[in-house]
Image (cartoon, rainbow, N blue to C red):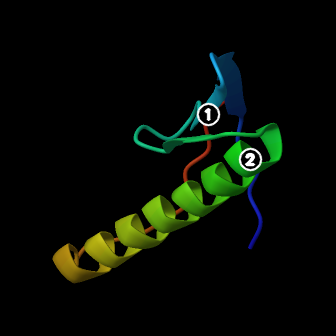
């Protein structure tokens, strides 16, 4: 499954700092723009995977359903 998110990348000194606008905690840095992008993809993947595992472990009797919001 593919989803699209918004990456925000800023040059700060000799580093690029990056975060995902829609997902708190998905942030990283890199010495190059390409490295920052790679690191951000990996950080986002890990956060989403961890959230799915936490939800599965703690919500055995919970209902899961898609939700859509217009922003």
For residue 40, above or below residue 8? below
- Relative to 53, say whether 45 is above or below: above
- Depth check: give the residue in front, 17 or 4: 17
Question: How many marks are shown on the rendered structure?
Answer: 2
What residue appears at the point 30 percent right and 71 percent down from the top-left corner? 55
Q: Are marks 2 and 1 in contact (CB under 8 Å)?
A: yes
- Residue at the image point whose x is 63% and y is 54% from the top: 39
> What is the distance, in whole Å, between disc 2 and disc 1 at their CAs?
8 Å
Residue drawn where x is 40% and y is 42% of the image: 25
- Quadrant position of residue 68: top right
Give the labeled residue for mark 2. 37
Locate residue 16, reporting x and y percent.
Answer: 66, 30
Write down the quadrant of residue 62 in the picture. bottom left
Whole-percent x and y of residue 23?
Answer: 50, 41
| Quarter the N terminus occupies | bottom right
Tell me residue 48's x, y (percent).
Answer: 49, 63
- Disc 1 on helix, strand or loop? strand
Q: Nearer the viewer, residue 60 or 44?
A: 44
Can residue 71 be seen in this snapshot? no
Residue 68: give its label.
Answer: none
Mark 1 lies on residue:
18
Q: Residues within 10 Å of mark 2 (few under 14, many from 20)?
A: many
Left or right position of 59 against 29: left
Q: Quadrant of residue 71?
A: top right
Which of the marked residues, 2 or 1, is nearer the chain's N terminus? 1
């Amino acid at each position: 499954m593919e989803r699209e998110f918004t990456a925000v990348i800023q040059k700060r000194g000799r580093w690029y700092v990056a975060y995902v606008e829609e997902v708190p905690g998905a942030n990283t840095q890199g010495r190059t723009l390409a490295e920052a992008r790679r690191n951000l993809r990996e950080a986002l993947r890990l956060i989403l995977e961890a959230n799915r595992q936490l939800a599965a472990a703690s919500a055995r009797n919970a209902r899961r359903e898609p939700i859509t919001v217009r922003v």
